[in-house]
Amino acid sequence: MARIVLGMAVPHSGMLGKAPEEWLDDGLRDHHNQMLWFRNQHWQYDDLEKARKPENLKAFLTLEERQARARRTAAALGELRRVYEANKPDVAIIIGKDQKEIFMDTSPSLAIYTGEDLPNGPPQRPVFAPDHDVVHKAHPQLALHLITSLERDGFDVTEVLRWPDNTWMKPPRKVVPHAYGFIYRQIMSDNPPPNVPVFMNVFYPPNQPPFKRAMQIGQALFEAVQAWDSEQKVALIASGGMSHFVCDEELDQVFLQAFKTYDFDRLAQIDERTYQAGTSEVKLYVPVLLAMSQLGCQTNVVDYVPCYRTEAGTGEGFGFMYWTPK
């Protein structure tokens, strides 16, 4: 039987690859965004800045504050990298999502890649890929086992046989979506073990799995790994952030407390409208949380770092977490 030796939840934002001196440059783009999602509704930038004025978010925009928070995120990523290397998994299952990077004409609710190769490289930004083409190895045997097991449990799983072109690149190229590239580069140091990308469409209506469905997927995925006839050590890694593209520390604290206590009921009671835009990536944590709760693991929060780039609170709440079974 396979043995799960590690669980992780890792934010994958491009903001983590930018110098803090450049964060406010990204904020200039936010000023023109008239569809900012916050507290279950869309906001125009000016209205959101006015509504959040009592929070005095301007205090978090000084260069000194930005640099301090960037140091904390770098240290947290370094700690996750250290934990990953210490546990040396033989294979990884990475739960992420596509953001119109490879699924352009289709949008599967749940998909698993069964091919051999995982290409990465330019023109992805350096935080997601090296400056040259690389090909990492997938794990078709485990991928097929997961699909077979999930289908037996009543899930309709899309099998991705070949890596599609990223048609938004000119000319089209084959590179993994940023959710996976970030893990390969920042956690696995461009040397990942054979791994299985699992896609959950948490981003785009209308076929987003609701939270309770995400729990069912997580339970079935855990049971499939437990039933895998292999002696290999497995890592389960969720690639996604907490509140974004507008940072909401109050909401993030609700998430963190629920993660620490495995309070799935509390997470399921949160309005589904909250799990939209980037904040929807919290659903990607569910398979890892379910597995680690059943393995009796303590949630280790390395750090939580809210990072801002405008007075309206645009930015992201970065949580860095891991679990190691006893």
Image: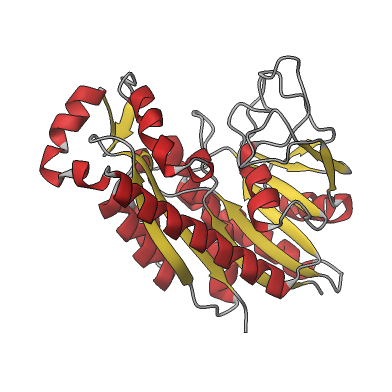
- Location of residue 88 in the rendering, given as x and y in whole percent from the top left corner: 75, 71
Say which residue appears at 66% left-offset and 64% top-offset.
222
Please, which residue is most extreme toward the top here? 170
Q: Quadrant of the C terminus?
A: bottom right
- Location of residue 35 in the rendering, given as x and y in whole percent from the top left corner: 33, 23
Classify residue 260 by image quadrant.
Answer: bottom left
Say which residue appears at 10% left-offset and 43% top-offset.
54
Say which residue appears at 83% left-offset and 40% top-offset.
134
Residue 253 is at least partly visible in this image: yes
Left or right: residue 21 versus residue 127 is left
- Location of residue 179 in the rendering, given as x and y in whole percent from the top left corner: 61, 43
Residue 253 against residue 201 in the figure, above or below: below
Residue 276 is at least partly visible in this image: no
- Location of residue 323 in the rendering, given as x and y in whole percent from the top left corner: 57, 72
Left or right: residue 273 versus residue 294 is left
Left or right: residue 273 versus residue 178 is left
Relative to the observer, which residue lies in front, 220 or 47? 47
Residue 27 against residue 94 in the figure, above or below: above
Q: Which colour assignment does the render follow?
A: secondary structure
Q: Quadrant of the N terminus?
A: bottom right
Q: Please tell me how many numbered marks the rendered image carries.
A: 0
Please, which residue is most extreme toward the bottom here? 326
Relative to the observer, which residue lies in front, 146 or 23? 23
